[in-house]
Image (cartoon, rainbow, N blue to C red):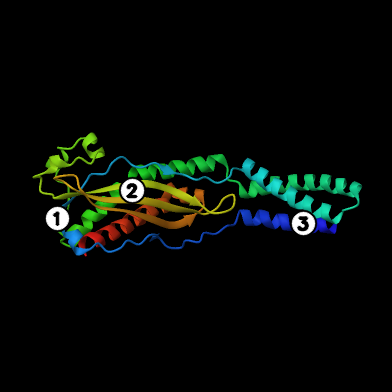
Amino acid sequence: MNATLRCCAVALAAVAIAGCRTGENDFPRIVNEPMPVPPAQRSSFGVIGILPADLAAHFEFGQPARPGEAMGVIGTTAFVGLVNTSTQNDEGHPGRQLEDIAFSAALAGVIGVFGGVLAGVPEGDVKRAQAAMSQALQDNPLEAGIQKQLERSAGKNLFQNLVPLPASGAARLNDNAIAKKDLRKLTGSGVDSVLCLQVDHERFLPGGGLNPPMVVDVNLRVQIIRVTDGQLLFDQTLEYQGDAQPFTRWGENHAKLFRAELEVAQRTFAGVIFDELSN
């Protein structure tokens, strides 16, 4: 029985750990630092028009375990650990093994219930957090925010080769032309090439545990296309990984932290892209 009690302590510690993970990322960054653009390639871009943002990408919300899910995971894990330890110590005593299995099942159930309450996140809290973050994404779509930051940087640094696409030029394009990257209608609009930004994915990367800190992860494809013939002059994918917070923490106070993280991601992407195009 002492072995069983020792195993109980281990199982309870595992429950505590499952609900108390900490994130590894403590600063936002571009994971794959880009190589400098050769001067000859950069000069081929000419005057670059920033193509208006497409519809906002779909954010993949990885979610924490609910109390019921957490109870099952913790209870099962505790039962397996308890049974393995107790039956090993009771080899050659079938009656005692059955007794310990029954005791382990009852104890694992108790551990599962308490662990699920402690580590699981109520459904209502998850829905409120996701609704707040979804609203934040509607208020400040990632692509549009990056474009605004690029326009601001170009104006601040008097960089004349990166400009918003003129309204007269944008009016010449329809959704089909943009989808096919057929930009010939922009010939004579004052731009030589077009900067296209496309979010391939934006999501949470969960850590281990039932309610782990979740890292904001975004892949952004950056392309520059020549107007006259549709030639692809530049093609690069940047990956951003930022701060890590538990799911409901991201959604607190009208998603205050999540909104701030979106702005940091936008500034970070825009800073890298502007440096590539201007230096």
> Going 55% across and 40% down the picture, which residue do you hit?
123
> Going 20% across and 47% down the picture, which residue do you hit?
231
The percent coordinates of residue 11 (x first, y second) are 72, 54
> Going 38% across and 60% down the picture, which residue do you hit?
32
- The front one of 175 and 154 is 175
Q: Amino acid at mark 1?
A: Gly
Q: Which mark is residue 7?
A: 3
Q: Amino acid at mark 3?
A: Cys
- Name above or below for residue 151 compared with residue 131: below
Q: Amino acid at mark 2?
A: Leu
In what element is the residue under mark 3? Answer: helix
Quadrant for residue 178, please give it: top left
The percent coordinates of residue 180 (x first, y second) are 24, 38
Q: Which numbered disc flags the more N-terminal residue, 2 or 3?
A: 3
Quadrant for residue 150, please give it: bottom left
Q: Which numbered disc flags the more N-terminal residue, 1 or 2?
A: 1
Q: Which mark is residue 46?
A: 1
**C-alpha span from label 3 to label 1:** 69 Å
In what element is the residue under mark 1? Answer: loop
**Residue at mark 2:** 142
In what element is the residue under mark 2? Answer: helix
Quadrant for residue 131, please give it: top left
Q: Quadrant of the C terminus?
A: bottom left
> Going 62% across and 54% down the picture, which residue do you hit?
18
The 10 Å Cα crowd at callout 1, few under 14, some 14 to 19, many 20 or more, is some
**C-alpha span from label 1 to label 2:** 26 Å
The 10 Å Cα crowd at callout 3, few under 14, some 14 to 19, many 20 or more, is many
